[in-house]
Every structure is written in structure tokens, then in C-alpha cells.
């Protein structure tokens, strides 16, 4: 079990998280479970996904082929969880090559 230090940060008590315990997001939930204090990342939602999608505007006919390809890949039953989870965890600004990665069978 890993141990770390507790210290004062202003009027708050803080805990130094070792590198292996870093969070990817900037927001975490904190709650008590018995005598434990639990920290966990706030789950990202479909609303977060929609906020990061590009604005296609009124004329997006050039993008229809790409959109259809993306929907086809996303609709692969074995790919849905892996690809949507990747996108939600890594954000819209990551390399879109995840759409082209083969899925595990």
C-alpha cells in the first residue's frame, strides 16, 4: 500500500498524490465511505462530448462521407465501448486516428 503526506494549503488540508495516482481530469468527486475518504474522477457525459464536437455549420456536404464512415465505425458492436470511452477520456483535441484503429474481435 502506498503512503503519502498530508499538508496545509491555505485553510484547507491537502494530500500529495504520487505520480501513479494522478487524475486526468481537473475535477474529482470526494466523499466518505465509512472511515475512508474517497477521491474519483467526475464521469464525463455525452454532454461533454457534444460540447467538443466541431460546429459543422449549414453547409457540411463535404463532410458527409467522413461522418458516415465515423458512424459506421462507431456502430460496430465490439467497438462502441472502446472508442467512445477513449474519446470521452482523452477529449476532442486528441488525434482522431482512434477512428481508424482496428477493433479487437
Image: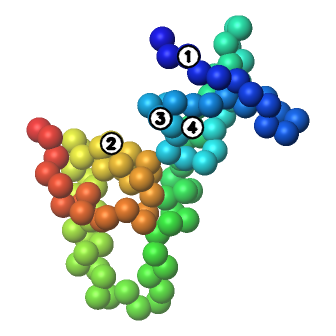
Mark 1: which secondary structure? loop
Circle 1 sits on which residue? 3
Mark 3: which secondary structure? helix
How far apart are the two marked residues, 4 and 1, measured between alpha carbons? Answer: 20 Å
Query: Based on the displayed image, in which of its 4 quarters is residue 29 positioned?
Result: top right
How far apart are the two marked residues, 3 and 2, measured between alpha carbons? Answer: 27 Å
| Mark earlier in primary sequence (4, 2) | 4
Query: Based on the displayed image, in which of its 4 quarters is residue 27 positioned?
Result: top right
**Which numbered disc, 3 or 4, marks the residue closer to the eye?**
3
Where in the figure is residue 16, as x and y percent of width and height? Answer: 62, 31
Numbered label attached to residue 34: none
Q: How many marks?
A: 4
Q: Residues within 10 Å of mark 2 (few under 14, many from 20)?
A: few
Tell me, yes or no, whether the two marked residues, 4 and 2, touch with CB atoms within 8 Å: no
Circle 2 sits on which residue? 81
Q: Is residue 92 above or below residue 43?
A: below
- Judged left or right of residue 90, residue 28 is right
Numbered label attached to residue 19: 3
Numbered label attached to residue 41: 4
Amino acid at each position: 500500500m502506498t503512503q503519502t503526506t498530508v499538508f496545509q494549503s491555505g485553510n484547507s488540508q491537502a494530500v500529495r498524490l504520487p505520480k501513479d495516482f494522478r487524475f486526468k481530469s481537473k475535477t474529482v468527486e470526494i466523499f466518505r465511505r465509512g472511515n475512508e475518504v474517497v477521491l474519483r474522477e467526475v464521469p464525463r457525459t455525452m454532454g461533454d462530448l457534444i460540447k467538443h464536437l466541431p460546429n459543422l455549420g449549414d453547409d457540411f456536404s463535404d463532410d458527409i462521407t467522413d461522418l458516415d464512415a465515423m458512424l459506421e465505425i462507431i456502430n460496430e458492436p465490439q467497438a462502441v465501448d472502446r472508442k467512445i470511452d477513449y474519446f470521452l477520456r482523452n477529449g476532442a483535441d486528441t488525434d482522431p486516428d482512434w477512428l481508424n484503429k482496428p477493433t479487437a474481435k
